[in-house]
Amino acid sequence: MQTRMTKLENDVHHLRDDVDVIKGDVREIKSRVGSLECTVTRLEQKIDSSVDRLDAKIDSAVERLDAKIDSAVERLDTKIDGAVARLDAKIDGTTSLIMEKLNGISQALTRYPSKLQVALWAGGTLTALLGIAVGFVGILLRLNGQPLMAEAAETLRGH
């Protein structure tokens, strides 16, 4: 039993040595973790600072681009307005010239009847004469006792 006790004491002694080593290792790990926490904090601050600087640079670049775009839009608007004004003037001049020519043609047409005007007058006259003739035929048919035929003639006439 003595040997067993000695062995147990020896094992306990080794366990204590191991625990002492583990305690030292834990202290060292705690020290390193603390150092890492400081390093991480510094890195976070650097990252935040870098992000803020990049944000400012991006904002500045966007403002410069906006100013350039606004300037380009103003120049294009001015050019387009000038082109529209020139086109309006040309269109107005062309319209005036066309109106003058049309007025001249209209005056020439009103001086002399055209073939179309003569044909329309003749067609109107013939239509009126035909209407009168159909009406006269309707009267004659009624006088001769043909009211049904007279109604047919009236229908042709449009009454």
Image: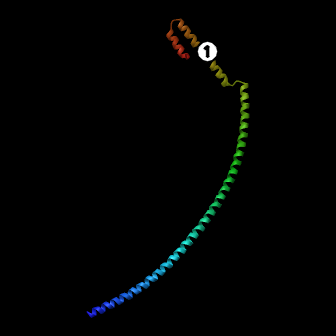
Q: Quadrant of the N terminus?
A: bottom left
Query: Where residue 6 sits: x, y (%)?
Result: 30, 93
Determine whether 43 is above or below 141 in the image. below
Q: Quadrant of residue 51?
A: bottom right
Q: Which residue is mark 1?
A: 129
Q: How many numbered badges does the structure rendering display?
A: 1
Residue at position x 55%, y 10% in the image: 138
* Residue 61 screen position, x and y as percent: 63, 63
Q: Residues within 10 Å of mark 1 (few under 14, many from 20)?
A: few
Pick the front one: 38 or 83: 38
Q: Tell which of 91 and 106 is nearer to you.
A: 91
Estimate the x, y position of residue 118 in percent, counting from the top left: 67, 22
Who's the residue at 59% across and 67% down the image?
52
Q: Is 48 on the left or on the right of 70, as rendered?
A: left
Which residue occupies 49% across, 11% down? 148
Above or below residue 152? Residue 81 is: below
Furthest residue in direction top, as rendered: 144
Where is 37 relative to 83, above or below? below
Front-most of 88 and 65?
65
Q: Nearer the viewer, residue 35 or 91?
A: 35
**As drawn, 127 above or below 15:** above
Residue type at mark 1 is: Leu
Q: Classify the position of the C terminus by image quarter.
A: top right
Q: Residue furthest left?
A: 1
Give the secondary structure at mark 1. Answer: helix
Residue at image position (51%, 11%) is: 149
Q: What is the quadrant of residue 106 in the picture?
A: top right
Q: How is the image coloured?
A: rainbow
Which percent across, then down, holds residue 110?
72, 26
